[in-house]
Image (tube, rainbow, N blue to C red):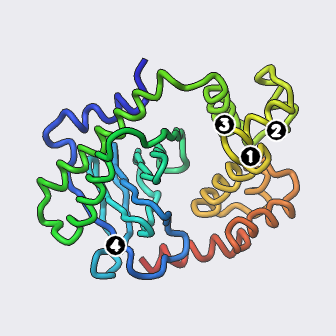
Amino acid sequence: MTHLLFPLLSPVLEHPAGIRQVYFAGAQHPVPELAYQVDFPRLELVLDGVQMMKWEDEHGNVQTTRMQTGDALFVPAKGWNSPQWQQPVRTLSFLFGKQQLGFSLLNWDGEQFSSSEKGNVGRRGPRTGAFMLQALNELAWHRQDQPTAKFLVKGLLSHALDLFSSSVQTVSRSQALFAAIRQYIEEHYREPLTRDSVAKAFYISPNYLSHLFQKSGGVGLNEYLNYVRLEQAKNLLKGYDMKVREVAHACGFIDSNYFCRQFRKSTERSPSEYRRQYRSQFENA
């Protein structure tokens, strides 16, 4: 059995021109609103399509670049990037944590995210990945050396594929069940899901469902359900002129006031403020 990343990365790794261009983000100034930032290095790869991407370069200047199929962006620890979801595009992101390697596969059809996959695996064995990440950090100041940059990016992708492929054989039944439940929630978030209804769909007890989320995900079921719904709400607020009440109902929130409270708790902004801020940044880009 092979991991789902294998058919995605094999063409990139096997073709001499699989990586078209490697870009480098910096980490000097405060992060703009709505941009992505984490404490670990990341690698963003465009698999198909075109995506406008903003980031800060090594001199602290904000860059806006039209990333195409085969383009990769290396983001150092605490660096930031801001993808613009406009044209259809499929992207693959890797996050290199100290103990785990995570990936996120997104497919934007031009109007909404039509599919997504996420996963993580422990970073074990030789420090191959750490050495390549360090080399990419140093190469950020010599970005004209594209042959070396492409070689290192391919090496990291190959290392990630090896880790995920080997993990397929050791995934426990509970982890597989947890992944299936997460996918179920991401597909049915618009429905009035409850702990009992989700447990019933998988023929398990509600108590075991709660235990599974705490053990495998470190979050509660309702917390994860709200996270999925709020992420979808952000997409609707950015791309459509729907009323806040309509956005809430489209994302599975029966009570729009509860939706607004949860949205502010998550973003420190009301849904209307979030929309205005996003569109103001987009118009001034």
* Pointer 2 or 4: first along the chain: 4
Q: Which mark is residue 149?
A: none
* Pointer 4 or 3: first along the chain: 4
Measured as percent of width and height from the top left, residue 7 is found at 34, 28
Find out whether the residues at labels 2 and 1 contact each other: C-beta distance under 8 Å.
Answer: yes
The residue that mark 4 highlights is 26
Query: Which secondary structure, mark 3?
Result: helix
Q: CA distance from mark 3 to mark 1?
A: 9 Å
Query: Which secondary structure, mark 1?
Result: helix
> In the drawing, does residue 194 fall left or right of residue 153?
right
* Pointer 1 or 4: first along the chain: 4
For image coordinates 23% across by 67% down, the residue present is 140
- In this rendering, is residue 242 above or below 212? below
Amino acid of disc 1? Leu
The residue that mark 3 highlights is 182
Q: Quadrant of residue 178?
A: top right
Measured as percent of width and height from the top left, residue 149 is found at 19, 56
Measured as percent of width and height from the top left, residue 177 is found at 66, 26
Is 248 or 181 nearer to us in this picture? 181
Find out whether the residues at labels 4 and 3 contact each other: C-beta distance under 8 Å.
Answer: no
> Which mark lies nearer to you, 1 or 4?
4
